[in-house]
Image (tube, grey):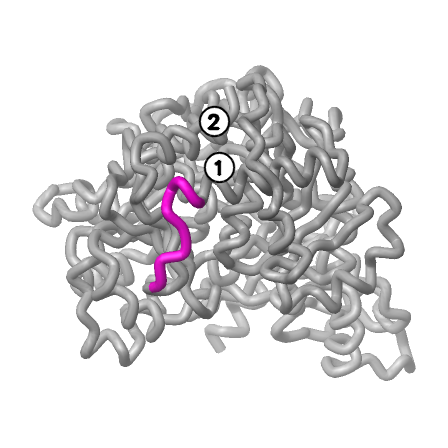
Amino acid sequence: MNIAHLLLRAARARPNTIAIKRGTTSVASYAKFAQRSGSIARWLTETVNLKPGDRVGLAMTNCVEFLEVLFGCWFAGLVAVPINAKLHPREIQFILENSGAKICFTTDDLLNGLSGIMGDLPLCERLILANSVEYSKIFQEDPLGIVSRRAEDPAWLFYTSGTTGRPKGATLTNRNLLGCSLAYFSDVDVPAEGEHWLHAAPMSHGGGLYGLPFVAGMGSQVVPESGKFDPPEIFDLLPELPKAGMFAAPTMVKRLIEHPSLATADSRNWKTIVYGGGPMYVEDCKAAKSAFGDVLVQIYGQGECPMTITCLPRADISDVNHPSYETHIASVGRAFTNVEVMVADENDQPASIGEVGEICVRSDVVMSGYWENPAASAETLRNGWLHTGDVGFLDSEGYLTLRDRSKDMIISGGTNIYPREVEEALLAHPGVNEVSVIGEPDEEWGENVLAYIVARPNMGVDDKSLDLHCQDLIARFKRPKSYRFVQSLPKNNYGKVLKTELRNLLAREKEN
């Protein structure tokens, strides 16, 4: 089974239906979408000499070409490696090296940075700029028919950092992607012809995966002209997009309801706003419901089980008279129809109702493992369950409430930031002796990155020098927003830094 069959099916059934728009401009019908993806597949196979199972990097900001390339990879039986466009070029280099990608597609805004690393990528032989003359020549190729693939063959490598070490590639198979798509139909919404999916969140992440059910349902996908989340642009587009849906982090929803444009916006075309990737505070949920109506759906997932662990449907968010209403909207909902969720105790056994433990998942949507990392795969997928690293509890109705998201992980604006990556970058500074990074609560972004620094004597370390140092090593969104210089870090008897003590220290600072 090749996930690209979703597009072939739509092209046969609705060849003239608009599949892709750039803003309000129609770019491709389903017939044209399939034709262009088939031409990319032919070019990758015959000109670049890629074989089924080879990897292709997509280091691209949101654009219509992303969709063509993504399905072009799948038509040819290749494995797509979508990469967070906010990453530093050296971080992108690691992903391309680790995945063994032989070619990478990119966009104008990333071209200079990626051009500088190509010499250090012996396996990645070509960098192709979307919408360039070279890219346009690809469509002189006759479309390639879909290459046969098995359900268990890899289709998408989703690079998601752990709390230790380098990013790991969650291997998502054709079966995983189909399961994620069908879960959308069963628990979130039913896309159909004449409806629109707005790609305001990064297409390299979970929001991009929701393009699949819209291809299956033969709706239209819309990429904003800006290629990013911009509240005024979204409000301007809405009147032109009947039955519109969008994925957004809770901070994005908050920005929409607090933006001045809302006062004069016509929001009646919203059908579904799916939110996830961080906590939605109860009051913010109520405000969004008041602003947009009964359109909100919450999902909880992670790269290893993309977008598909639990769902809080619009019926629950709309049922304000339910006696457990506030408890429900403070939860992340119940397990998707095709997912088993277990909260495990310290012995990896099912915890009692209301008992806090690690959230574990079993489903056809769970990744097959981490790319070329058997040790991490065995640890995370032990005993037949995906161990998420997240902590929470189940109530008697099956609603899951999160207590922590991977304990040390920072979620800022819906984006995961892993402290060790930031700590390792800071420790490369000659003036830094020790460092520990935690999340600092922030009303707009959810959390900001805060670094506690033990500096070496007489080295002149300050905020500015650390900012300049990080600029060359890690992406902007991972850099600390503030620093605290301390004489020592709290540690246990084994020398492990006690981040809980740092969080308590920060809480006391804010109280005073």
Q: Mark 1 points at which residue?
A: 306
Give the prevailing secondary structure in the magenta stretch: strand
Residue at the image point whose x is 59% and y is 60% from the top: 131
Residue 141 image position (x, y, % from top left)? 61, 42
Marker disc for residue 26:
none
Q: Mark 2 points at which residue?
A: 365
Q: Is 327 one of the magenta-colored residues? A: no
Residue 400 image position (x, y, % from top left)? 35, 36
Given the image, on which type of amino acid does mark 2 rest?
Answer: Val
- The answer, for residue 401, to whether it is visible in the render is no
Asked if the residue under mark 1 is in contact with the one under mark 2, i.e. CB atoms within 8 Å, the reply is: yes
Residue 91, compared with residue 178, is above or below; it is below
Residue 347, compared with residue 485, is above or below; it is above
Magenta part of the chain: 25-32
Residue 288, by quadrant, is bottom left
Q: Which of 355 and 257 is in front in this view?
A: 257
Residue 396, compared with residue 490, is above or below; it is above
